[in-house]
């Protein structure tokens, strides 16, 4: 069910307002109380393919300037190849960021990290597979809130660079 902005959880409201300030209206939906713990759960809840779920994956890297968090927007059916992401970022290696670092950098907890509207700017890459669809679904600040968006708008709002950095676990 689509929630009105006034009825949204404060974290989802921040995502909504951030997009609205940039001229984009998000139709944020709220899952049932149990939420969605996996991309498969999210796809079933909104009635789309798992490939259309945007996973906002935060990775930690060490650069010449110190630690940096990186954002990989990945199709729900794919997994991030950390070595490929590190190469794209020009760092020796990277790994999944810790929950405290994710919250500090984005303002959101793992499981509900939206692709944009973060507390700090993150270099961002997008899985080309997400661009195969007319609509994809992303987290809206909590594990229970999501929104549909056109992939072109997702790329524009995030400043993401399209790049191959994923593996398909089914292959």
Image: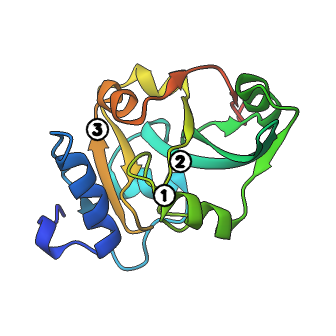
Which residue in the structure is indicated by mark 1? 113
Residue displayed at 51% across by 52% down = 40
Q: Secondary structure at mark 3?
A: strand
Task: Report if the CB atoms under discs 1 and 2 are less than 8 Å apart.
Answer: yes
Q: Which mark is residue 56?
A: 2
Measured along the vertical axis of the image, is residue 38 above or below residue 54? below
The local crowd at label 3, few if under 14, some if 14 to 19, many if 20 or more residues have their Cα within 10 Å, is: some
Instruction: Give coordinates of residue 5: x percent, y percent.
Output: 14, 65
* Relative to 51, 80 lies left or right: right
Residue displayed at 28% across by 75% down = 9
Which residue in the structure is indicated by mark 3? 149
* Camera sees residue 17: yes
Of residues 136 and 90, the one nearer the viewer is 90
Q: Can you name the residue that lies furthest to the right here?
A: 92
Residue displayed at 29% across by 74% down = 10
Measured along the vertical axis of the image, is residue 75 above or below residue 147? above
């Amino acid at each position: 069910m689509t929630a009105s902005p006034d009825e949204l959880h404060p974290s989802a409201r921040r995502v909504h307002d951030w997009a609205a300030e940039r001229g984009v209206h998000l139709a944020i939906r709220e899952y049932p109380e149990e939420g969605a713990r996996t991309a498969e759960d999210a796809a079933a809840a909104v009635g789309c393919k798992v490939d259309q779920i945007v996973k906002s994956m935060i990775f930690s890297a060490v650069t010449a300037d110190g630690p940096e968090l990186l954002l990989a927007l990945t199709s729900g059916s794919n997994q991030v190849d950390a070595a490929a992401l590190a190469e794209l970022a020009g760092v020796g290696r990277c790994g999944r960021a810790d929950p405290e670092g994710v919250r500090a950098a984005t303002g959101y907890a793992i499981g509900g990290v939206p692709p944009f509207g973060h507390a700090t700017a993150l270099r961002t890459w997008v899985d080309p597979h997400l661009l195969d669809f007319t609509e994809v679904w992303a987290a809206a600040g909590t594990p229970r809130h999501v929104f549909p968006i056109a992939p072109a708008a997702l790329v524009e709002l995030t400043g993401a660079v399209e790049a191959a950095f994923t593996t398909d676990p089914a292959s």
